[in-house]
Amino acid sequence: MTDDRITFHYAPQTRAFGTRFLLEELGVPYELHVMDTRVGDQLKPDYLAVNPMGKVPAISHRGVVVTEQAAIALYLGDQFAEAGLAPGLNDPRRGDYLRWMVFYGSCFEPALVDHAMKRPPLPRNNSPYADYETVVAIVNEHVGRTSSFWLGEDFSVADALWGSALFWVTNFGIFEKTPGVAAYIERVTSRPAFRKAQADEAALVAARDRAG
């Protein structure tokens, strides 16, 4: 019999929060494997056997390991299609959905990190994301056209990724919280699943800090 449980390899106060938010939105049970990145749990042999990159998030499900935040989100959206959070293969939104999910990891996050670290930009033809200004303009233009959620009127997997990401990068001060961005973040972070994930993470951090 195939084990249908989801094991969620997770560390608080990391990008894994977006996956926790998505799991709460999907309403599927999962088992937390909690690590403390402050003491290097993610670099211990048992976890490196799961993800040799030593990063979170990762999930184990039905004998399959999935790493990389966007890949996990895509996998979960399709595995639990009955939740209606991912456009199906014949949905006209599917192409746009895939584009934005991959754009996050291939362009948005690398551009912001390079800019925040003050790394000299590569020549445009050599850069995987063109340039920082273009990436920021594309995201802001999209958010400016978004009256509700990332793909339209309905919340989707894309919002779990982009909403949680914009929440954190604006809090860190590495992406401008324009009125449009602020309104989008508010729509996402006011959802019960986000609030629950946030409260659960806060309780976990508090317990960890009390334990020393």
Image (cartoon, rainbow, N blue to C red):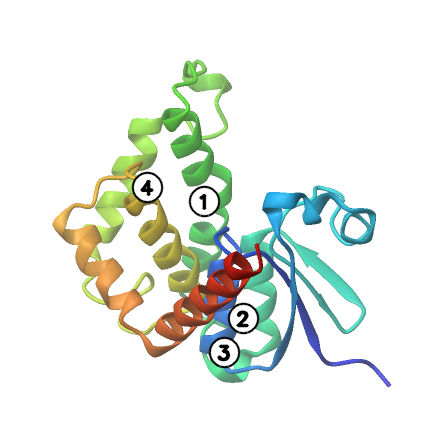
Q: Is residue 13 above or below residue 190?
A: above
Q: Quadrant of residue 186?
A: bottom left
Indicate which disc residue 77 carries: 2
Camera-side mark, 4 or 3: 4
Mark seen at residue 172: 4
Distance between mark 2 and mark 1 Cα atoms: 17 Å
Q: Amino acid at mark 4?
A: Phe
Q: Position of residue 137 (x, y in %)?
A: 25, 36
Closer to viewer: mark 2 or mark 4: 4
> The disc labelled 3 sits on which kind of residue?
Leu
Distance from label 2 to label 4 (Cα)?
Answer: 28 Å
For the question of whether residue 131 can be seen, the reply is no
Disc 2 and disc 1 in contact, CB within 8 angstroms: no
* Side (left or right) of 142 relative to 24: left
Question: Which SS class for mark 4?
Answer: loop
Tag 2 near tag 3, CB within 8 Å: no
Give me the disc on residue 103. 1
* Label 1 or label 4, whichever comes before in sequence order: 1
Q: Give the CA separation, mark 4 to mark 3.
A: 28 Å
- Pick whichever of labels 2 and 3 is earlier in the sequence: 3
- Residue 67, by quadrant, is bottom right
Rendered position, 107 above or below 65: above
Q: Position of residue 135 (x, y in %)?
A: 34, 35
At mark 2, the secondary structure is helix
The residue identified by callout 3 is 26
Question: What amino acid is found at the position of numbered circle 2 in the picture?
Answer: Gly
**Residue found farthest to the left:** 179
Point out the tag, 2 or 4, that comes first from the N-terminus: 2
The alpha-carbon separation of the residues under discs 3 and 1 comes to 23 Å
Q: Position of residue 43 (x, y in %)?
A: 73, 43
Give percent across and percent down for residue 24: 48, 76
Mark 2 touches mark 4? (CB < 8 Å): no
